[in-house]
Amino acid sequence: MADPIRMMITAAGLDALVDAQSGATDAVQIAQVGLTQSAFVMAPTITSLPGEFKRISAVSGQSVSETVIHMTAQDNSEDIYDLRGLGLFLPNGSLFAVYSQETPIFRKVSIAFFLLALDIAFSNGAAGDIVFGDTSFLMPPATETVKGVARIADPALAEAGADHDTIITPLTLRQRLDALALALTATINALSESTDADLNSLADGFNAIIAALVARTITGTGLVTGGGDLTQSRTVDVRAAIGAEAIAGTATDCALTPAALRAVQAALTVGGTGLVTGGGDLTQSRTVDVRAATGAEAIAGTATDCALTPAALRAVQAALTIGGSGLVTGGGDLTQSRTVDVRAATGAEAIAGTASDCALTPAALRAVQAALTLGGTGLVTGGGDLTQSRTVDVRAASGAEAIAGTATDCALTPAALRAVQAALTITGSGLVTGGGDLTQGRALHVEAASVAETAEGALASKAVTPASLIGALTQLGGWQSSVPLFRIPGTPIIVQAGTMRATVTTELAAPMVFPVAFPNACIWVGPITYLSADSNVRDLFVQMRERTTTGFNVFFQAGDSADNRADGFDWIAIGY
């Protein structure tokens, strides 16, 4: 059995179910099943089945467990549809429960009747409180071609062998076969009293009959396969085409079923593009349409889903006009030919320049040209009226004039500018070298002193850079970070520093060795006690004793017996 579908009970259905479970009313009765081809989102707030197109009263069902109901419904009409959702309705028309899915639950074609058999699951043991108004069918009567419900024959019907509407069970069949076996045994015992010749003759007859029957065969041609001789049960078969084979249209070894035909119909569509609307797959009659534009739509010119008819075009023509503004006169709507006009200006009007209702022609323009002149001021010379080509001129300054810088009746050219650039120079003095005239890019240069030259301090023609300064200081003295040690440049003075780290809890002497021995003498050492943490009992302090060029000695001194700890000391020494 397939997994039951889970219907969602609506708010109205829940109210009816609560009343039934509390005993306030009888059990909830399902009177009709509503059908829809539209998939929708199930919700308890739904009061009507979305897209409902049909209701079926031929519905029956019964509870098969506390949570599951087996329901059947029939539709014997010739309607065609894809079922994607259904709803259960109470006798008062209220929607009790709904179910929907995206893919079709069932596809009905016109030549088939609809028989829906579903197992419906409800939560909280609701199935026992739901009944159906029509319990006359849960399945149709079973026949050789239709699956359904069949009555089981009792031993009397099986023995009579005349009822074609019942089926026999293995037990009843075994009882009938045992009875036949007993009868056959009695017959054989009776025959055993006959002569051996009669028995042999009878056996030969039976064998001949069996051989004749076994020699016969049942086979098929065309789409029919299977079969064979009658030594055993045989099956002949005509394979049903699947939807994909029906759509492909190439298979030659299978037959088209209504379901396969429906797959082909569902795969093929009739429709349109552009202005054409409608259509769909071929599972039902379809209509395509090109909507005619109304006059208002044609005039608005914004609709993209309709076509222009002569009537709509005339509406556009009546709504549109051709006319003019400014100099243009005449015109009218586009239902007939129209004329627009622009009046030509006279020469006098063109020269006066005041008329605003006429246009300039070549003749009027020539009158204006004869009346107007082109000339210049300042550096500009030449010109005349505009009836012919005229030349105005600006004289170019010579190089000498550009260098002198006194002429006021000529303009500077690139050549004159180059003469000025050649006459001017940029040079340097002191440490600066290089330069030249301004006819090209020039570079001025200051040469940098090396570290050795900076340390020597004798050159006056080079500049000291930060790098050469630091290098010279390093050569002359400077900082030695690995010790640490610092030599004061220009002097023999050397400064060293260091630390001693150890936990000291008693008075004792501590010798220290300089990282680098002083060449001549150590003139001063300053030790200071180091504490790793604040404490009122860490009062050991260091006292300086003797010092040499290679090191010095200190003594840890306690102020009293309780001041008994130090964590080392730091020191700095000066020598040369």
Image (cartoon, rainbow, N blue to C red):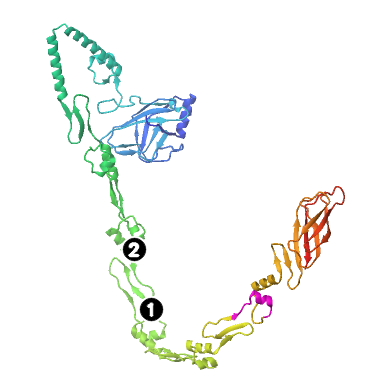
Residue 224 visible? The answer is yes
Secondary structure under tag 2 reads helix
Q: On the image, which quarter does residue 306 sit in?
A: bottom left
283 vs 208, nearest the viewer: 208
Instruction: Determine the CA span between mark 1 and mark 2.
Output: 27 Å
Question: Vertically, is 275 above or below 261?
Answer: below
Q: Amino acid at mark 1?
A: Asp
Identity of the residue drawn at 41% across and 85% down? 352
Which residue is the extreme one toward the right?
A: 560
Identity of the residue drawn at 87% across and 52% down? 559
Q: Which mark is on residue 482? A: none
Q: Residue 19 appears at what percent x and percent y?
A: 48, 27
Task: Tell me if residue 106 is in the magenta stretch.
Answer: no
Question: Vertically, is 443 above or below 400?
Answer: above
Q: On the image, which quarter does residue 316 sit in?
A: bottom left
137 vs 206, nearest the viewer: 206
Q: Residue 207 appears at what percent x and percent y?
A: 15, 18
98 relative position to 485: left or right? left
438 relative position to 309: left or right? right
Residue 283 visible? The answer is no
Q: Amino acid at mark 2?
A: Ala
Q: Residue 522 appears at what percent x and percent y?
A: 80, 65
Q: Which mark is on residue 357? A: 1
297 relative position to 379: left or right? left
Identity of the residue drawn at 14% across and 7% down? 194
The N terminus lies in quadrant: top left
Task: Tell me if residue 456 is in the magenta stretch.
Answer: yes
Query: Which range of residues does the magenta coloring cover?
Result: 445-458
Q: Residue 230 appears at what percent x and percent y?
A: 18, 25
Secondary structure under tag 1 reads loop
Q: Earlier in the sequence, mark 1 or mark 2?
A: 2
Q: Which residue is mark 2?
A: 319
